[in-house]
Image (cartoon, coloured by chain):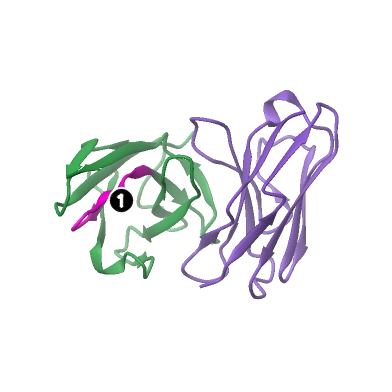
Chain colours: A green, B purple
């Protein structure tokens, strides 16, 4: 059974860079049929797809965040990561890492991690 | 961007009720529509993908239909564990977008 677990600081200062890592267990991050993504959800609000990365290096980022987002895969550690630069209070949300199929269906989710941006 | 809307935004129902939630896309998305369930404090869970395919392990009381711009999620007989928020998501075109959610609570 595939499992995903987010890790990273729960508190980031405004204007700094948010960095999160997702560790994948129970499967290989090098699967050609898998895309590894990030979705976020402000407390009590809806969901926003941040972006996806394939182990080959192919990435997709939501245009609303594209200029601030970097995603990468570390196949040696079976991990993928998200960096979001120049954070503001609007980036205070729960961040989920997900596994997406070729159809971009998020079929496995991490438990989510709350990141708070402080001033 | 493709805008997704859902109706109703919330509904109250009793165990055993048949519940239908509607999702509409601002343009045709063919059958690239997914449904997720989110219980309070938990991560969303995939229920239905490609409009009508039930994800493995999801009870058969959940079903999906539709194509183009209009889609529905139906719960044939609501169970206590089904009280949650339901989101639709289009995977037809980037950026992939979600509906605002429909909360199903206990009448």
Provide the residue span drawn in magenta. Answer: A83-95
Q: In the image, is residue A106 above or below residue B61?
A: below
On the rendered structure, is A88 left or right of A1?
left
Q: Position of residue B53 (x, y in %)?
A: 71, 52
Q: Is residue A74 visible?
A: no
Residue B45 sits above or below residue A61 on the image: above
Foreground of the two, A21 or A15: A15
Q: Nearer the viewer, residue B86 or A26?
A: B86
How many marks can you see?
Answer: 1
Residue drawn at point x = 24 percent, y = 53 percent: A88
Residue highlighted by disc 1? A91
Question: For the point 72% across and 24% down, which residue is it?
Answer: B80
Q: Is residue B53 above or below residue A111?
A: below
Q: Is residue B105 left or right of residue A55?
A: right
Horizontal side of A113 relative to B15 (left or right) equals left
From the top left corner, tell me how far across and down residue B100 is, in percent. Answer: 58, 53
Quadrant of the rendered structure where residue A54 is? Answer: bottom left
Q: Quadrant of residue A112?
A: top left
Residue at 77%, 62% in the rendered image:
B66
Let me know if residue B3 is in the magenta part.
no
Secondary element under disc 1, as helix, strand or loop, is: helix
Relative image position of residue B58 (x, y in whole percent): 68, 37
Label 1 Cα crowd, 10 Å radius (few <14 / some 14-19 / many 20+):
some
- Position of residue A50 relative to residue B95, above or below, is above
């Amino acid at each position: 059974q595939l499992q995903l677990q987010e890790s990273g600081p729960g508190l980031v200062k405004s204007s700094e860079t948010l960095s999160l890592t997702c560790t994948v267990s129970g499967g290989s991050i090098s699967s050609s049929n898998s895309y590894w993504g990030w979705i976020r959800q402000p407390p009590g609000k809806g969901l926003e797809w941040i972006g996806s990365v394939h182990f080959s290096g192919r990435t997709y980022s939501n245009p609303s965040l594209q200029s601030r987002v970097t995603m990468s895969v570390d196949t040696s550690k079976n991990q993928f990561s998200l960096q979001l630069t120049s954070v503001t209070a609007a980036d205070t949300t729960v961040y989920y890492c997900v596994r997406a199929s070729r159809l971009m269906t998020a079929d496995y989710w991490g438990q989510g991690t709350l990141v708070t941006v402080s001033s | 961007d493709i805008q997704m809307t859902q109706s109703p935004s919330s509904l109250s129902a009793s165990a055993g009720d048949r519940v239908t939630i509607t999702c509409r896309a601002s343009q045709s998305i063919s059958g690239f529509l997914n449904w997720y369930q989110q219980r309070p404090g938990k991560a969303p869970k995939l229920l239905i993908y490609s409009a009508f395919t039930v994800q493995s392990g999801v009870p058969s009381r959940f079903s999906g239909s539709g194509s183009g711009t209009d889609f529905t999620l139906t719960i044939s007989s609501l169970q206590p564990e089904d009280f949650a928020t339901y989101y639709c998501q289009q995977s037809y075109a980037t950026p992939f977008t979600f509906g605002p959610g429909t909360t199903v609570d206990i009448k």
